Image: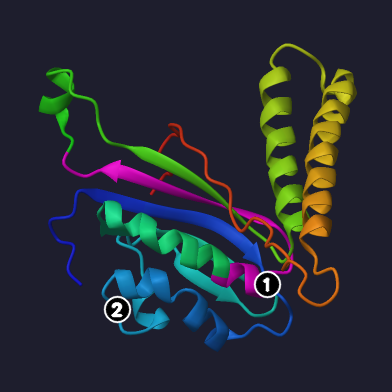
Amino acid sequence: MSHEDAAFEIHVHGDVKLRDDVGFEHLQDALKPLWKYAGARSLAEGAVSLYEDEPGIRFDPHQHLLQMCWTLRGDEDFRQQLDDLCMNLNELSALGAQMEVTFYDAQYDEEDEERGRESRDDFVLLFVGPTPEAIMQAQRNLLVEDVVALMERHFDGSELGGVVAEIDKLFEGRFDALVNSLELGKPRGPGGAGGGNGPSSGHGSGRRPRHLH
């Protein structure tokens, strides 16, 4: 698949802690939505980033860690690969983790800016994890990090314990609601209703600064 005239440069960024039994061959299958879209015939071939100074897609077998700092050319249809990617990584992950996918308008230039045309840059935040609880924990950690970083401009970090406690209450309520929904979905004897699946990813939109290449 060629994307030489693609509308976007797409950057995928994140670290995912993997189960101890996960090997390269498992990642070869799990990351197929990425490397196949890039037109590669294998993960080893597709792991190289568009930019030489980015590490691309790496697997550290000693730390059992998947590391991604990888850019490719693509179009809006790349979004279709993200759900499959999240589902695949859910199966291999040991902890909840976040991944950032940034779409940079490859056709936007200085003339467009001078004419006041807005770029089509976009940002998607994804979460993966072995369980819904692990995914929620990753979401909670990111929210606490963002809120504390913002409020430390005005308050000392030691003053923000109450803010963090309120965030924890919000996630406790969400977790309780999730548990209740799963309990209601469990089979209740022969012919009972089937169970439901927990969330596989979280999507967020908004503008973020480019990663440095």
Q: Is residue 203 above or below residue 164?
A: below
Is tag 2's residue or tag 1's residue first in the polypeptide sequence? Answer: 1
Q: Count neighbours of disc 1 (C-alpha within 10 A) and say few if under 14, some if 14 to 19, many if 20 or more.
A: many
Q: Residue 100 lies in magenta, yes or no?
A: yes
What SS does tag 1 mark? loop
Tell me residue 62's x, y (percent): 69, 79
Quarter of the picture holding the N terminus = bottom left
Residue that appears at 18% across and 18% down: 116
Residue that appears at 46% across and 45% down: 124
Q: Quadrant of residue 174?
A: top right
Residue at the spot of label 1:
18
Q: CA distance from mark 2 to mark 1?
A: 24 Å
First to last magenta residue range: 88-107
Q: Quadrant of residue 208?
A: top left
In the image, what residue type sits under mark 2?
Ala
- 152 or 142: which is nearer to us? 142
Asked if residue 38 lies left or right of residue 4, the reply is right
Q: How is the image coloured?
A: rainbow
* Residue 58 tag number: none
In the image, what residue type sits under mark 1?
Leu
- 189 or 42: which is nearer to us? 189
Residue at the spot of label 2:
40
What SS does tag 2 mark? loop
- 167 or 60: which is nearer to us? 167
Tell me residue 190's x, y (percent): 81, 77
